Image (cartoon, rainbow, N blue to C red):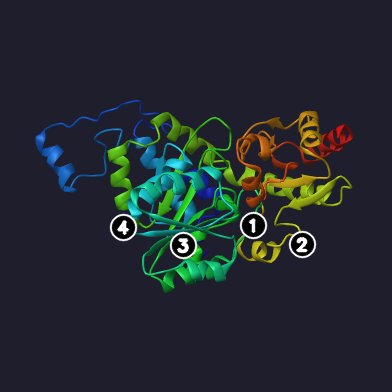
Amino acid sequence: MTQREPGLSTLSVHGGEARVKSDYGLVDPIHCSSAYTFDNTAALIDMLEGTAAERDEYARYSSPNTRTVEKKLAELEGTEDAIVCTTGMSALSLLFLAELKPGDRLVFFDQCYHRTRQFCFEYLRTYGVDCVQVPTGDFEALEEAMNGCTRLLFTELPTNPHLTVIDLERFVQVAKAYDAATCVDATLASPVNHLPARWGVDYIVHSATKYLGGHNDLLAGVLAGSRARLEPVRKLQGIIGAIAAPHTAWLLQRGLKTLPLRVQQQNKSGLAVAAYLNQHKLVKKVYYPGLPNHPSHEQAQKYLTGCGGLISFELKTDREGCARFIDAVRLPRIGPSLGGVESLIEQPAIMSFYKASEADRQRWGIDPALVRLSLGIEDTQDLLSDLDQAFHCI
């Protein structure tokens, strides 16, 4: 029988791990050490010269736990290398700081995490980086924003919270025409539903706090790509110290082992709940690319194998009526994250944009009665029943 490439579930369980571990345990231990010692000076020089076997020196640079989970993540993403950071925002910030210098231009689509936008406009610009935001999916505007100084293009896929799926193939083509790099935040897809590297994307970033960790019990971020591209980012990480602690890396490694199983259930529930909401008389609009009437449905069919457990929808009520609906659900808890085994729900106009101006909320498409629902792995029918009873409270 021809040897086949391992599947995603197999990589999730075994990828990056030694078959026989140092202590013969089935599960890797947590290495709670800040420093790693050397038998003699010659051993230290061998490490510095790169002639010794891969090992660690100081936990601000790497640890056995971070190295193992980075290898696993690289295998899942189909990239040469991956870096585990303290959060998704630290992974993205390290990339921007390492990749961009004064006078360079960063172009990104306007449907994005509000902290990403804030970092670009309030901080990167102070270092002389030209940050340009264009309407999501508007490739004419994207082309107009490109110039000889454009070094990096960034997008989410799908976007948060409207779940837009851009034409990724065209996005990469535009970047190559200007010799610019590309970065995709694939947090909402996870490697189960989307592999940007297959489409020629240079950098893939995730908030590992979400689907990758999957249990709402860790904060971490991931940046994946080629070893050469990630080298300056890893160097900057060692200077700044934005590396995941060994225990966090161990938790992430544990969470990844069930990633395909969890996301498959979230895909199933996501499509069922979105279809239910799409026909409900009290729902004005549903944002879920798995629905045929979503503007990005055709792109989702091309780039995604599933649409995940995050659904955004606008209710036919005001902000107060929306709050009553959210307060009435029994399974989802009110919280700002997504992708975990427990369902979470929030009203973005309050949770993330409470202090934003009305003009900004309108510009970013944040309706007062917009709901963002992140489905966990509860039974699909239980989630549907819960939503049904909550609608009576509007």
Q: Earlier in the sequence, mark 4 or mark 2?
A: 4
- What kind of element bears circle 4? helix
Looking at the picture, which amino acid does disc 2 mark?
Answer: Pro
> Badge 3 local density, few (<14 within 10 Å), some, or many (20+)?
some
Mark positioned earlier in the residue sequence (4 or 1): 1
Q: Is residue 15 above or below residue 253?
A: below
Residue at the far left in the pictured view: 41
* Marks 3,4: beta carbons within 8 A: no
> Viewer-nearest of labels 2 and 1?
1
Which three-letter amino acid code belongs to the residue tagged 4?
Ala
Q: Earlier in the sequence, mark 3 or mark 2?
A: 3
Tell me the CA gap for discs 4 and 2. 40 Å
The answer to whether residue 255 is left or right of residue 306 is left
Per the image, the residue denoted by label 2 is 292
Which residue is drawn at the image coordinates 10% and 38% (left, top)? Answer: 42
Residue to which mark 4 is pinned: 228
* Residue pictured at 64% horizontal, 32% vertical: 335
Query: Tag 2's secondary structure?
Result: loop
Labelled pair 4, 2 in contact (Cβ < 8 Å): no
Task: Work out whether mark 2 precedes mark 1 in sequence or the reverse, and give the earlier one.
Answer: 1
Question: What SS does tag 3 mark?
Answer: loop
Q: Are marks 2 and 1 in contact (CB under 8 Å)?
A: no
Q: Nearer the viewer, residue 171 or 268?
A: 171
Horizontal side of residue 227 vs 354, given as left or right: left
Mark 3 — residue?
A: 201
Residue occupying image coordinates x 70% and y 37%: 347
The answer to whether 161 is drawn above or below residue 132 in the figure is: above
